[in-house]
Image (spheres, rainbow, N blue to C red):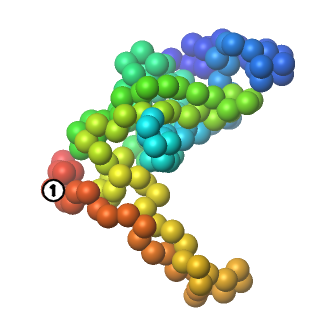
């Protein structure tokens, strides 16, 4: 499947204010995708989509991404069981970013066992220009042990 599976991009006015999905994939064929909880709006993860994964997401209502490291489609939860049911698909103003609002079935979005992939925060003591002060602290509790969920093949 290619970007031709989606309507061709037209005028700026139509892209920014129109009612037709005209996603802008980058030169690598990818579009950024932010995934949020549909109730709390908490950011759960960030990944990329290509035309095939976007089309699969629309067709199945299952969050599907393009895994750059594995070079293949990745249906979220296919291994862990922590799937994401898409409740709403949104685009930003110029349609070069996708946002999914999802129900996280299983409760954890992160492969490290956390609800969100954003489970660490920069400490208040961090100072620009001082690399040794750039410390992270955990801002969430782990929900599962990845070693028991992901079996190496």
Compare residues 76 and 88 and report the one nearer the observer: 88
Asked whether residue 73 appears in the rendered view, the answer is no
Compare residues 51 and 59 and report the one nearer the observer: 59
The residue tagged 1 is 148
Residue 140, image quadrant: bottom left
Please tell me whether residue 92 is drawn above or below residue 12 in the rendered image. Answer: below
At x 50%, y 47%, the residue is: 43
Which residue is at the far front? 39
Q: Characterize the local packing of mark 1: few (<14), some (14-19) or many (20 or more) Cα atoms within 10 angstroms.
A: few
At x 50%, y 42%, the residue is: 41
At x 53%, y 26%, the residue is: 89
Asked whether residue 12 appears in the rendered view, the answer is yes
Compare residues 141 and 76 and report the one nearer the observer: 141
Please tell me whether residue 97 is drawn above or below residue 125 in the rendered image. Answer: above
As helix, strand or loop, the secondary structure at mark 1 comes to helix
The x and y percentages for residue 29 are 60, 31
Please tell me whether residue 98 is drawn above or below residue 147 in the rendered image. Answer: above
At x 65%, y 24%, the residue is: 23
The x and y percentages for residue 25 are 65, 30
The x and y percentages for residue 94 are 74, 29
The x and y percentages for residue 90 are 58, 27
Number of marks present in the image shown: 1
């Amino acid at each position: 499947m290619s970007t031709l599976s989606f309507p061709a991009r037209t005028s700026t006015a139509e892209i920014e204010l129109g009612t037709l999905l005209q996603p802008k994939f980058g030169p690598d064929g990818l579009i950024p995708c932010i995934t949020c909880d549909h109730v709390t709006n908490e950011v759960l993860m960030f990944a990329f989509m290509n035309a095939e994964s976007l089309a699969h997401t629309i067709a199945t209502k299952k969050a599907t991404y393009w895994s750059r490291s594995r070079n293949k489609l990745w249906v979220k939860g296919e291994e862990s069981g922590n799937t994401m049911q898409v409740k709403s698909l949104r685009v930003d103003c110029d349609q070069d970013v996708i946002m999914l609002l999802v129900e996280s079935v299983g409760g954890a979005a992160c492969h490290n066992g956390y609800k969100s992939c954003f489970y660490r925060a920069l400490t208040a003591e961090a100072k620009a220009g001082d690399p040794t002060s750039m410390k992270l602290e955990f801002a969430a509790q782990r929900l599962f042990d990845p070693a028991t969920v992901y079996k190496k093949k």
